[in-house]
Image (cartoon, rainbow, N blue to C red):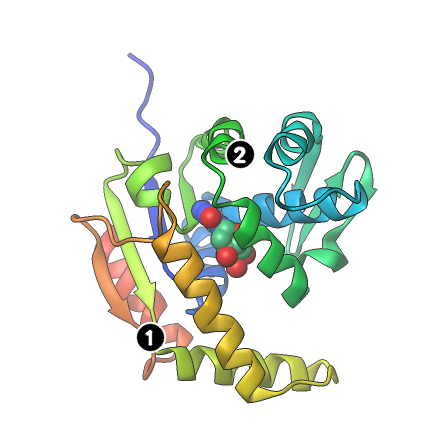
Amino acid sequence: MPIPVPVLTIDGPSGAGKGTVSRLVAKKLGWHYLDSGSIYRSLAVAVQNASIELSDISAVLEVAQSMALEFECGDDLVVRLNGENITGQLSLESTGGIASVVAAYPEVRAVLLKKQQDFKQLPGLVADGRDMGTVVFPEAKNKVYLTASAEKRAERRYKQLIEKEIDANIVQITSEIEARDRRDMERETAPLAMAVDALYIDSSDLTIEQVIEEVLNLIH
Ligand code: DC
């Protein structure tokens, strides 16, 4: 019998703090970390590089099937697409928007499913995304649904951008976040939804440390 690999899934809308929490929890536990959004974001970059229409499903699918992704999971994640370092482009707001559009195609999700499941390796995995607990790792013993109000998420994103000296507009960010929530929650295939067996955490009024404590309590 193979040794079972423990999996912790953390799903939720963009900007709830999933990335930071998942990365730090994985580090504390000494487990692997899957940032599934970065796979959809890499596809968004690949689609942009190929200059194809987002509405051309078969062309998007072809790009998804042929892209070679490498992840270097050190202190900071480095992603290479067909050998080229694309890490800088992944965090752009525009990349997230395109990722959310191509992620709505069921055929694309099917192609990217195995790439994500391959991350499940000993000693354990922390997987962050939208459908980790519902579709990709439904067998996971520990599941979290991490959310926060759209206003709080927009405020955090605004602060991050200002700190990086990037021009930002809070009204525009809030409406982009709300549009992305709608697209991710209302799509037919693997929409963002809370798994029935997930622990619900609203991070609106919590610090990162408090969220991490709640998550680690669940594991222990
Ligand atoms: O988590 P993120 O913001 O990096 O994700 C970018 C987009 O990718 C998100 O808006 C929807 C899509 N996505 C998805 O459909 N399923 C996932 N498991 C992760 C991300």
Q: What secondary structure is marked by label 2?
A: helix
Question: Which quarter of the figure has residue 22?
Answer: bottom left
Residue 193 x, y percent position in the rendering: 29, 53
What is the number of the mark on residue 203?
1
Question: Which quarter of the figure has residue 190?
Answer: top left
Decide: few, some or many residues near mark 1? Use Cα within 10 Å; few <14, some 14-19, many ≥20: some
**Where is 181 relative to 84, above or below?**
below
Residue 10 x, y percent position in the rendering: 36, 53
* Residue at mark 1 to residue at mark 2: CA–CA distance: 31 Å
Q: What residue type is labelled 1?
A: Ser
**Where is 36 relative to 93, above or below?**
above
Q: Name the residue located 45 percent from the left edge and 77 percent from the top edge.
A: 153
**Chain-order first, disc 1 or disc 2:** 2
What is the number of the mark on residue 66?
none
What residue did someone put label 2 on? 108
Residue ranking furthest to the right = 84
**Where is 95 relative to 16, above or below?**
above
Q: What secondary structure is marked by label 1?
A: loop
Q: Name the residue located 41 percent from the left edge and 64 percent from the top edge.
A: 181
**Residue in the foreground of this view, choosing between 65 and 31:** 65
